[in-house]
Image: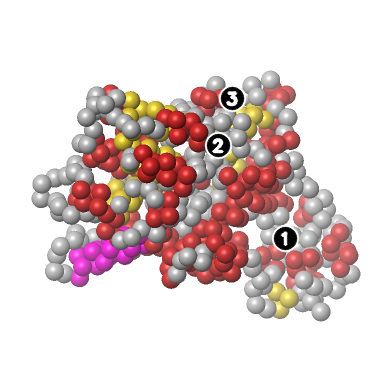
Amino acid sequence: MPPNPNSLIGDLKSLPQIIGGSGQSDRHIVLVRRNHPLTRERSDRKLIFYHKVSRCRLEVKQPRSQIIRGSTHIKVRTMLRHAIQVPKMTSILDEIRREFPYAERDASGRRRIFFENAAGSLVLRRSAEAESKARLECSANVGGPFWESKMNEEVILEGRKSVRDLLNASSEKCIVSGESATSLLFQLSYALSKEMTGIENIVLTEYEHFANISPWLELQRRGVIKEVRFVKFNPEDGLLDLAHLASLIDKKTRVVSVTGVANTLGSKTPLTEVFKLVKEAGAYGVLDAVHTIGHVPLDVEKIDCDFAVFSAYKLFSRRGSFMYGRQDLLDKLDPYKVEPAPKEPPEKWEMGTRDQALFASLSAVTDYLCWLGGKVESEVRDNITNYSGRQRLLKAAMFWIERYEQTLSRVMLNGTSKVQGMNSMKGLELYGMSDPSKTHMRVPTFTFNITDADARMVAEYLWEKHAIAVLAENNGGFYSRTLRTYGKTIAVRASPIHLNTVAEVEIFLAALHDSLKKFKQSA
Ligand SMILES: Cc1ncc(COP(=O)(O)O)c(C=O)c1O
């Protein structure tokens, strides 16, 4: 019987000795579970890791116990000699990571852990390839009788249909493209402002990104509306205060615009409840889905919002954004538009020439999600009973992602048998939801400070010493007002996504622990 490679895990302590011993060659194998912390730390050494070993059946001559304990004298070379090819054994996470060319290393070749997906996720190979293909092959503009032009039109239409299915929108005509979520929200605020008379109010939340604040404050500044109101969140758990929201909405409320997930705290907004209140008040409901789209399944029909905006670069793709709008509203409203542009949506809402490469890239993302959905469908069957066809696969992927990311959140907060979680780290100030039993109310976006340490120096230390990419940013604190509630202007944000592993979270936590020691010493 060949040993099960899953059970052959090199002893953590002995591994450095094994690879440090004399007489080692490129052909040595050390059995370490893929994503084991040491496979990263020791990547500079000549190791053939478990994921390569897993392609082989190993006839191990040594007693198994010797291998598991990993004494300094394991002669792994003999194992290689007896290795023969058998079908690959991979986990879904291995397969997912293969879809992202830079999941393990950056383009300079440095092995690193990328936990900065909140400001732009890692990119899918297939999305970048589709973008490049569309850029080269369909460079002609729409409207011509020739092949390149027709292909351009087809790519755009397919892209709209992809976004339609991703959001469960009623028609591809409801899908508008734009340069960024910020520009689409400005465009929307301008169109809606034509219905305002100077006495109305607009309701936002205290944890919005400024992309969903400035366009509405601009209306107030110009006297188009009377005021912008902000709904509080509870600083303890980072959750929106629904009672406060209800108290702020009145007869003069024309728009309620909320983020689906707070880009600083990771808190989820209870969208169905929010938009129910909005509808009862007869106001427009706008969803900023930029930080939501890569973490949570979205269904614009179910949550009953009027508009939803997201950016492709938060969804494993490139810069550029999309807006869903209810078809009657896209028809009725009057956005900025040059005269010869089509009078019908979605083109009526799109300023200038569309970028076919954005649409192609987004279609490739939905292909990826369908592939993932097909793999995990049985695990989330109960969540997707109302969907069929492509929408079912897309929702399957997103429900699976949402659930898997809860595991990452729990590990971030609680740690594992190997490493302490954030909740038990002394000197760490974590903002937002920290209850590990409520990870369904957050995504794994964690913002924190080390007491008395400069957040930028912490981020730099995590990068220099531990090769972990996180961000400390003080442009209002990730372009948001959220940190003001905590009396802070800057913090560090770590934002893993579904391609990240529990092992990576463990390494991050160990590195954070080390950072706490380091900055305590230097204080
Ligand atoms: C919640 C949220 N809204 C809006 C934006 C702005 O998106 P864009 O850069 O596409 O304008 C961001 C960007 O990080 C965000 O996180």
Question: In the figure, is residue 303 to the left or right of 430?
Answer: left
Q: Secondary structure at mark 3?
A: loop
**What type is the residue that disc 2 sits on?**
Leu
From the top left corner, tell me how far across and down residue 22 is, in percent.
80, 56
- Which segment is the magenta one? 147-164
Magenta span includes 162: yes
Q: Secondary structure at mark 1?
A: loop
From the top left corner, tell me how far across and down residue 300 is, in percent.
40, 53
Looking at the rendered image, the disc whose residue lies closer to the viewer, 2 or 1, is 2
The residue that mark 3 highlights is 454
* 10 Å crowding of disc 2: few (<14), some (14-19), many (20+): many
* 10 Å crowding of disc 3: few (<14), some (14-19), many (20+): some
Q: Quadrant of the C terminus?
A: top right
Q: CA distance from mark 3 to mark 1?
A: 36 Å
- Residue 195 or residue 287, whichever sits in front: 195
The residue that mark 2 highlights is 239
The residue under the point 48% across, 55% down is 297
- Residue 102 or residue 290, whichever sits in front: 290
Magenta span includes 262: no
* 10 Å crowding of disc 1: few (<14), some (14-19), many (20+): many
Looking at the rendered image, the disc whose residue lies closer to the viewer, 2 or 3, is 2
The residue that mark 1 highlights is 33
The answer to whether 92 is drawn above or below residue 435 in the figure is: below
